[in-house]
Image: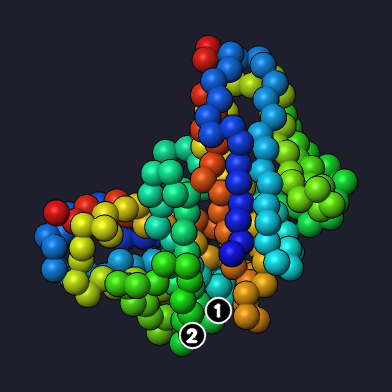
Amino acid sequence: EDKVVQSPLSLVVHEGDTVTLNCSYEVTNFRSLLWYKQEKKAPTFLFMLTSSGIEKKSGRLSSILDKKELFSILNITATQTGDSAVYLCAVIAPNFGNEKLTFGTGTRLTIIP
Amino acid sequence: NAGVTQTPKFRVLKTGQSMTLLCAQDMNHEYMYWYRQDPGMGLRLIHYSVGEGTTAKGEVPDGYNVSRLKKQNFLLGLESAAPSQTSVYFCASSLWTTYEQYFGPGTRLTVT
């Protein structure tokens, strides 16, 4: 059974701090790993990672994948209150000719002003 | 572009009642998905569709049926609602399986 585990489950930091969120996975035939940000409603896409060691960056957010150790991290620098959300990690893996997404339970990040 | 839309936004059902949730996307995506999200469980795939006229079971399909008669619409049906189906339901679509999924705003369903 495919498994995606995120840590920590929740995190509270002060505005301006840097945070690192972790995602480890055990899946058969890994294809890609995705990060989403979920505020009050729908998850919104952040990054898709397919290759090991290549950092993806978008403003203050960055992410990297380690396919040998089967994990990814999401970094947020100079955090702002608008970064408060649940961050979801998901893995795409083949499933009987189709591919499906397996989600972790998320990390709830709270930024204190 | 409206993206992915879902109706209704909220619904309360009594045990045994039936209902249909509608998902629509205007991005010409081939793939569409229905998830449920419960506290501490993350998002779990109920059913998905790889194209018009096709459907397939996901991780938690029992108690649900789906149909994809038109490419832009994906319907999720509950024939006889149970309290265990109280959840937030998200629809998503993607161009292809290896592309990111775009999510709808969710439907909060309560079964009493």
**Residue B17 falls left or right of residue A58:** left
Q: CA distance from mark 2 to mark 1?
A: 6 Å
- Residue indicated by mark 1: B50
Expressed as whole percent of the image width and height from the top left, the position of residue B69 reads 40, 84
Expressed as whole percent of the image width and height from the top left, the position of residue A39 reads 47, 37
Q: Are marks 2 and 1 on the same chain?
A: yes
| Relative to B36, residue B64 above or below | below
Tell me, yes or no, if residue B46 can be seen here. yes
User: Which residue does the image show at 56% across and 54% down from the upper left?
Assistant: A103
**Residue B40 falls left or right of residue A44:** left
- Label 2: element kind: loop
| Relative to A98, residue A65 above or below | above
Q: Amino acid at mark 1?
A: Val
The residue lying toward the viewer, choosing from B48 and B29, is: B48
Q: Residue furthest right?
A: A53
Mark 1 neighbour class, 10 Å CA radius: few under 14, some 14 to 19, many 20 or more: many
Quadrant of the snapshot with the N terminus of chain A: bottom right
- Label 1: element kind: loop
Q: Which mark is residue B54?
A: 2
Q: Are marks 2 and 1 in contact (CB under 8 Å)?
A: yes
